[in-house]
Image (tube, helix red, strand yellow):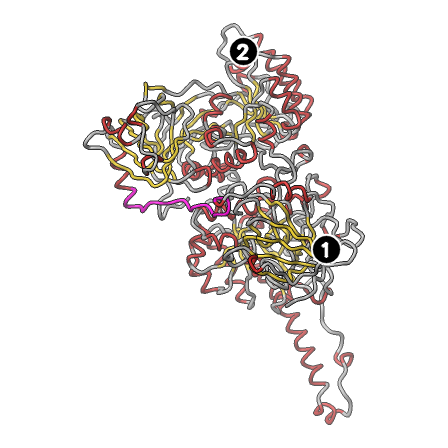
Amino acid sequence: MRRLNPRWNPVSGQDTTVVLRNATLFDGDSTLPGTVDICFEQGIVTSITASQLNSSPCPPKTHVIDLGGRFVTPGLVDIHSHHLELPFSSVAAARDVNEKPSLGTITPFVRAVDGFKPYDPAIKLIASGGVTSSLILPGSGNILGGQAYLVKNTPRPGRDQELVVEDLLFEHGIPQSGRRRYMKMACGENPKHQYGHTRLGNAWLLRQHLEEARKLRDQQDQWCQRAREGATPSFLHRFGYLGRPDWQGEYPKSLELEPTVALLRGEVNLNIHCYETEDMERMLAVLHEFDIHVQAFHHALGAWEIPEFLKQQEPNITIATFADNALFKHEAYGANLRAPRILDDHGIRVVLKSDHTGEGNYAKHLMWQASIAHSFGLSTDKSLQAVTSAGAHSINQDHRVGYVRPGHDADLVVWDIHPLQVGATPLQIYIDGVALLEADVLDSELGRPIRTAALLPPVQRPSMGKEERTRLIKKVTSPRGQIVIHGITKALLSWWKPSEDPNNAADADSEEAHQLTAVISAGKLTCIGRRLACAPHIRDNATYINLKDGHISPGLVAFGNKLGLIDIASEPSTGDGSPASSSSALNEQRDLHYAKYGVHFGGRSLGRARVGGVTRAITAPLRGNGGGLLQGVSVGLRTSDSATVLDGGIWKDEVALHVVVGQDGKGADTPTISSQFERLRQILRKGQSDDDGSDGAYARAARGVLPVVVSAVNQDDIAQVILLKREFPRVRLVIFGGHGAPAVAKELAAADIPVILSGNRGAPDTWEKKDVLPGPPLSRCPAEVLINAGVLVALSARSESKTHGLALEARYAAKFAGLSDDEAIRLVSTNFDEILGLPKQSADGEIHGGGKNKGDFVVWEGDPLRGEGSVVLTVQDDGRIGDCWPDYEGAVL
């Protein structure tokens, strides 16, 4: 057993022995039976014993913390991050991630550590999510990008607690010659676009460089061989003296080629950014030509299509991938939400990593990725391994981290609930035995008893066989058909209230007492209630669907994405296009654009949305960099795979007028933030002057008919919107983004300005967001602050690939804001109708069982708010079946 932590020092290191008593422990392999006591001192785990033994080999002066059964895991290990190179809050002067372009596309000699910023606020923020170790790699702009370095995410950890890079390094305390080495390579789109080479040219440049390094290695080997021969008795007998190195010349070496020579010698852990199957195949072919082996392919969103090939080529390969980040470029378009499970089924080691650069792939939420992968089929143990021991194994540090075992570093995370449950949050994080959070965070939680359900992993969402789904679709899409759904355990419909019909009563001890039946006739919900109450409404030819844990919710709404306007964000030819940056916001007739004219259906992002129960999307016109204040008028479209422009695919032509203020609102027409607000006032005054029944967008906005959605993240910019509301009280202003909104929450509520919040799990990744709330466990949740202040809130996920998780975002907010499940689901559904003043969707009469049929609804098997639900049916307000079991076996999600 290893007894010393090389990073420990007697000044700032762990100075008191700690015992975590009554812990439910996932030790890196599995969750141990019963509870255990974990003892650690001087940054090392010293013992793990069963709690009931009530004994510990730790010293008498020990700080004992009784966790009452709460979960403990190893500190999370992220093997792909870019913090320290791209510190929060990002400015150009501090970005040091890609060495380009003057040194060329082959730069193995550059070192990520030379660009580290030890003051990066992300260090503590990332650690607050439980991530204790991170491999910081250079960027992916170059074929051979440079050398990577492993760090511990603990601020100012050194003896003097100063901003020293060396103190952050994972192997601080180990001599340089004994430290492990890591290399970053890349293939595919990034190096291709950066230098204008084709894949053919990039392969040649790599081979050319490797051949040069191989020649140097061979020269070194020959030199050493001659030196060894010179030290033998036969050499002495032949020449009369022992050979010396200077006799055969200087040892051949090159500072530029040394890292690659070390790679050829197998001394470097190689990590390669690569997405598509053909790129992985050709990279392996080139590297194997030089007897180089890959430790891990990173991102690798196409790997699920070639698992056996990868195993044959590299039996020990790791796929370090995303759970759901995808679709943003061509090589990410073939992703699959079930990829981690598929890879694991084929025996490939799966690691989940962040690729941390900012809010879109924030390392703080690495465990969220494990939860997503688990929801889509990766086992509980493998999901937790994917963010702990699997990563530690891949970077050859599993003897120190990734596990909670005697002799391992005391990097541990105490969680408030099972770490795979939605909203799981660290109560305490220990790095080298030192607590990161203030003790009161943990102490306040320990005063409350923990429910047994909080310690259980979530249930994985079910799926349906393809043939069974095909048969069901034929039945449920019959124009005059009737669908009867049994086994509904919860109706998350704000407009539905159980009636007092005596038939709705049931024996409290029976299974029926906890289940409802729903009857859908000709696309309309005609009954919700107990089976007996709905029986008279059921026809003989009905199609029956029997569920185990059925839920009914309103159709979810995706807002602020590019759904329906572009399929691949980085490929303009796949979408509507962006207007010229020279447009003038005051020229309404020429430069105000309407998304309704550019809608195209059928993209994969719409499929992702359907998996998450999204029936409606609200999409504003596309805008490029420097697009200025004016974005345009958004459209309401359906996500159904049968939707068309001519057949009800657009449910509302014009939803809102969208403008952008802040850094993203700068352009030729509005080069400053001040000019943006000047121009917005001019737009509204112009609308007022046209307010004589004019149907123009500006006139309708000025009189409050067409909402004005202001994209803003900075609290001072949001405060300017509040002033604007006071000046133009009739205007229906809405904040979108809203990262800084909690700072002016009371004022927003007083001004009756709602917020569509995309930053509830936000990050201070830009300067204008530098003061945003960090969120739990370091602060209150932004949505909680707004809701408690009386602000009407809805939630948005900006990434098209993450719209499947809107219900999870709602659950996360609800956990901290103390909302019921009904209130939670409204955050991603009907609150949008209220915020945007949308007309109530069709109310086609009374429903037997209570309430009126209002709008789209979704039937789920499992709880959607907890990541356990799969969509069974979506029913549109026009009576059509929007989708049926989109998450079926074999589907590419």
Within 10 Å of disc 2 (Cα), the crowding (few <14, some 14-19, many 20+) is: some
Which quarter shows the C terminus? top left
564 or 143, nearer to the observer:
564
Q: Amino acid at mark 2?
A: Arg
> Hey, which quadrant is residue 446 in on the image?
top right
Q: Nearer the viewer, mark 1 or mark 2?
A: 1
The magenta region covers 453-469
Dot 1: what SS? loop
Mark 2: secondary structure: loop
Q: Taking the image as drawn, is residue 87 in sight?
A: no
Give the percent coordinates (x, y) of residue 121. 70, 43
- Which label number is shown at residue 858? none
What amino acid does circle 1 point to?
Thr
In the picture shown, does residue 168 fall above or below 564? below
Q: Which residue is mark 1?
A: 16
Q: Which x, y percent locates residue 869? A: 41, 40
User: CA gap, disc 1 to disc 2?
Assistant: 66 Å
- Please identify the quadrant where the N terminus is shown: bottom right
Q: Residue furthest right?
A: 160
Closest to the observer, 55 or 243: 55
* Depth order, front residue of 693/777: 777
Would you say 127 lies left or right of 166 here? left
Mark drawn on residue 703:
2
